[in-house]
Image (cartoon, helix red, strand yellow):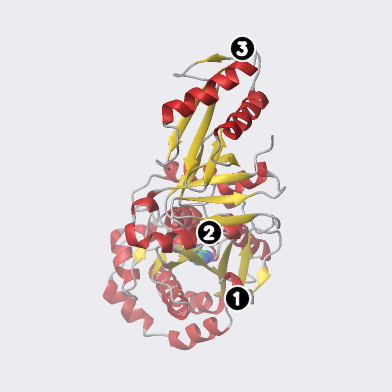
Amino acid sequence: MKYDRILIRYGELSTKGKNRNHFITHLKRNIRGVLKEFKNISIQGGHDRMFILLNGEDSKQIMQELSKVFGIQSFSLAVRTNKNIDEMKEIGLKLVQQLYHNGATFKVSTRRGDKTFEYDTNEINHAIGSHILMNIEGLKVDVKKPDINLIVDVRKDGVYLSSEIIQGAGGLPVGSSGKAMLMLSGGIDSPVAGYLTMKRGVKIEAVHFHSPPFTSERAKQKAIDLAKKMAAYNGFVKMHIVPFTKIQEIIHKKIPEGYSMTATRRLMLRITDEIRRINNGLAIVTGESLGQVASQTLESMVAINDVTTTPILRPLISMDKLEIIDIAQKIDTYDISNLPYEDCCTIFTPPAPKTRPKLDKIQHYETYVDFDSFIKEALENVETIIVSTENESRKEGFSDLL
Ligand code: ATP
Ligand code: MG
């Protein structure tokens, strides 16, 4: 007996009333995105649950990918039968036979979503259970802690039998809460911020600043590799790579040293906000955590945030570094982030940046330079790529994905 499908139970979205279709559409698209390499599967989206028909594809690999998709409460490998008690008994027996080992205990747990079915829950448990007991020698019932739990789900369109419920990633389907731009460095924090934002249903596009030749090709590749980890949650991530060398050089020359970091952040934020506007994003996400470094004091945030009224989401704001590292390890970004390649900001960081910059001062210093033309030039030279879960990242042009 081979499982022919994966049954998917929805998470929080089942409580979302009218928005349900919207959520289901996003969930289906994201599942299709992460499973795009499995060409034979088909996905059936229903009001209460979704099915992935395997059509011969490897269920193990598929389940591994599925465990990252937000909006899924749990899933199970399942077999469908007709609503016929004899057929249910036979398939149930075959499933338990496969799982049976010497001395194993079992129980049957029936859920009857379709109340019109001729047998009630107890009758179904009893009919299937006794058929199995009669046919497997040595098998015993244990209703409290069985080794094998045969789950029988009677629904309008058929009966689904499964034996294990696997916890999903929870959260909301990526995209169902709108889109934001993630300022993605090569560090530990910003990928974690991206992950947490996606978990609440926000689709992200990554914005990365690099300063060749001060930063190497490997530093850029590191950010792309981190974006690839983000892509695992819905299949792909659009990434904007901004050439930042000229701006950093002019800041270094013209802005008093204590304020160069504040100026750098303000310019990064202005450029990110412009990319957000062009791409119809609603917010900006950063990996800032209060008090971690000089740029992350409240005074610094006041001075930097001044350049935009766009909401800035900072999911890590109250977290300790160790809590952040914990999540980074869980989502498998920690080792990449720890690679030693230089970041564009650290290279130009002065020995003593102001931890309490004054807004009026930085506003004044910025008048020394015509930054608008530098911003325009940087925007004209942004490189936009689609980073996919597949091995190579592809140039933009995959409009079906967007
Ligand atoms: P991270 O670990 O994410 O690099 P950090 O603790 O090193 O964060 P900062 O270097 O002060 O802190 O950066 C604060 C935030 O600014 C980052 O979390 C990120 O969102 C953004 N940022 C920093 N450098 C870059 C960059 N090169 N490209 C894009 N965003 C950046
Ligand atoms: Mg950093």
Q: Which mark is residue 28?
A: 2
Dot 3 or dot 1: first in sequence order is: 3
Q: Residue 2 carries which label?
A: none
Q: CB of residue at label 1: within 8 Å of ligand 1?
A: no
Camera sees residue 349: no
Q: Quadrant of the C terminus?
A: bottom right
Secondary-structure class at tag 1: helix
Identify the residue position indicated by label 3 in the image: 103
CA–CA distance in space, label 3 to label 2: 41 Å
Residue 319 place in picture, x, y as percent: 37, 47
Front in this rendered view, residue 200 or 220 = 200
Identify the residue position indicated by label 1 in the image: 399
Secondary-structure class at tag 3: loop
Front in this rendered view, residue 143 or 392 = 143
Above or below: residue 357 compared with residue 44:
below
Q: In which quarter of the image is the N terminus?
A: top right
Residue 126 place in picture, x, y as percent: 48, 22
User: What residue is at 63 percent from the left and 62 percent from the top?
Assistant: 388
Quadrant of the rendered structure where residue 267 is? Answer: bottom left
Q: Which class describes the residues within 10 Å of circle 2: few (<14), some (14-19), or many (20+)?
A: some
The amino acid at mark 1 is Ser
Whether residues under marks 3 and 1 lie with C-beta atoms below 8 angstroms apart, the answer is no
CA–CA distance in space, label 3 to label 1: 56 Å
Above or below: residue 38 compared with residue 300:
above
Q: Which class describes the residues within 10 Å of circle 3: few (<14), some (14-19), or many (20+)?
A: few
Camera sees residue 188: yes
Whether residues under marks 3 and 2 lie with C-beta atoms below 8 angstroms apart, the answer is no
- Front: mark 1 or 2: 2
Front in this rendered view, residue 41 or 231 = 41
